[in-house]
């Protein structure tokens, strides 16, 4: 993905950013940035061209064959299992439309097919689409949020093109991920419930604890601290009733 020809010590920067983001940039015990995407995007952003994207010859001469291989590997290994089809389709459709728009605007300067061939022969685009944004830990599980995210990724990418930016889809994901990080951090909800046996009529209190999830639009990452110090994390769908018992999945 990246080229380190300006110094071997620069090998450490993407690694530190990738691993560090997973364990440091968390909200409620959950990381919100895809680690690989964060490491690549921030390395490109802060290195002032000391780190650049890998040149075409490192991807078999920018051959479509490499793109097909990456695509088929993703489809056969995990794409149909992670349930992110709506996200992939929404992003690809919107990206194709905005690419057609850019091709039409630039039609007097470049042949329109250059824009599409450039995308199809760019393996990093397929890695981004099928491996990074589909990360189950950092992408929404619901169909509608996936569609919204896919459209916004392509639109922010288009906006970055108007700023003559390079590596636009990595930066688009970084911008949206940063906004999502702050939104989640500000909306973090903490609730305390204690079970007792000496309240209620005749001291017969209900041993069950009821906790509301608010009105989220996507899955909620719940961190449960049980008596005795045990901590469990559960991903709970909104607008549903969940029964959570200690030690049971």
Image (spheres, helix red, strand yellow):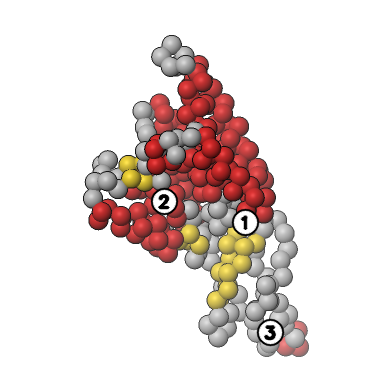
Counting residues from the start of the chain, the first of labels 3 and 1 encountered is 3
Q: Mark 2 points at which residue?
A: 38
Q: Which residue is drawn at 27% across and 40% down?
A: 49
- Between disc 3 and disc 2, the foreground one is 2
Q: Position of residue 53 (x, y in %)?
A: 36, 41
Badge 1, how many Cα within 10 Å: few under 14, some, many 20+?
Answer: some
The quadrant in which residue 69 appears is top right
Vertically, is 165 above or below 237?
Answer: above
Q: Which residue is drawn at 68% across and 84% down?
A: 199
Q: Which residue is drawn at 36% across and 58% down?
A: 15
Per the rendering, the mark at residue 117 is none
**Observer-nearest residue: 84 or 123?**
123
Q: Distance between the residues labelled 2 and 1?
A: 22 Å
Counting the numbered discs, the total is 3
Is 82 placed left or right of 189 in the picture? right
Marks 2 & 1, CB-CB < 8 Å contact: no
| Residue 46 visible from this viewpoint | no
Q: Distance between the residues labelled 3 and 1?
A: 33 Å
Q: Where is residue 66 in the image (x, y as percent from the top left)?
A: 51, 40
- Between disc 2 and disc 1, the foreground one is 2
Vertically, is 69 above or below 120?
Answer: below
**Observer-nearest residue: 71 or 139?**
71
SS at circle 1: loop
- Between disc 3 and disc 1, the foreground one is 1
Marks 3 & 2, CB-CB < 8 Å contact: no
Q: Name the residue under label 3.
A: 199
Q: Name the residue under label 1.
A: 219
SS at circle 2: helix
| Residue 27 visible from this viewpoint | yes
Q: Report the quarter where the C terminus lies.
A: bottom right
Badge 2, how many Cα within 10 Å: few under 14, some, many 20+?
Answer: many
Q: Residue at x 61, y 45 (%)?
A: 72
């Amino acid at each position: 993905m990246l080229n380190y020809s300006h110094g071997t010590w620069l090998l450490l920067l993407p690694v530190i950013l990738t691993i560090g983001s997973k364990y440091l940039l968390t909200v409620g015990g959950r990381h919100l940035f895809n680690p690989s995407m964060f490491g690549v995007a921030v390395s490109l952003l802060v290195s002032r061209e000391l780190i650049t994207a890998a040149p075409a010859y490192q991807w078999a001469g920018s051959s479509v064959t490499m793109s097909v291989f990456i695509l088929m590997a993703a489809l056969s290994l995990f794409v149909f299992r992670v349930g992110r089809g709506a996200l992939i389709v929404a992003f690809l459709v919107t990206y194709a439309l905005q690419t057609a728009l850019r091709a039409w605007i630039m039609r007097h300067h470049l042949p329109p097919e250059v824009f599409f061939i450039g995308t199809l022969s760019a393996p990093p685009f397929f890695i981004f689409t099928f491996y990074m944004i589909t990360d189950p830990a950092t992408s929404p599980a619901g169909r509608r949020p996936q569609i919204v995210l896919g459209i916004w990724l392509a639109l922010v990418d288009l906006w970055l093109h108007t700023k003559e930016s390079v590596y636009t889809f990595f930066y688009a994901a970084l911008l949206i991920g940063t906004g999502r990080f702050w939104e989640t951090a500000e909306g973090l909800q903490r609730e305390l419930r204690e079970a007792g046996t000496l309240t209620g009529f005749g001291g017969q209190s209900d041993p069950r604890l009821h906790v509301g999830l608010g009105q989220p639009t996507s899955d909620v990452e719940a961190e449960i601290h049980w008596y005795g110090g045990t901590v469990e994390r559960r991903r709970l769908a909104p607008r549903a009733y969940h029964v959570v018992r200690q030690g049971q999945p």
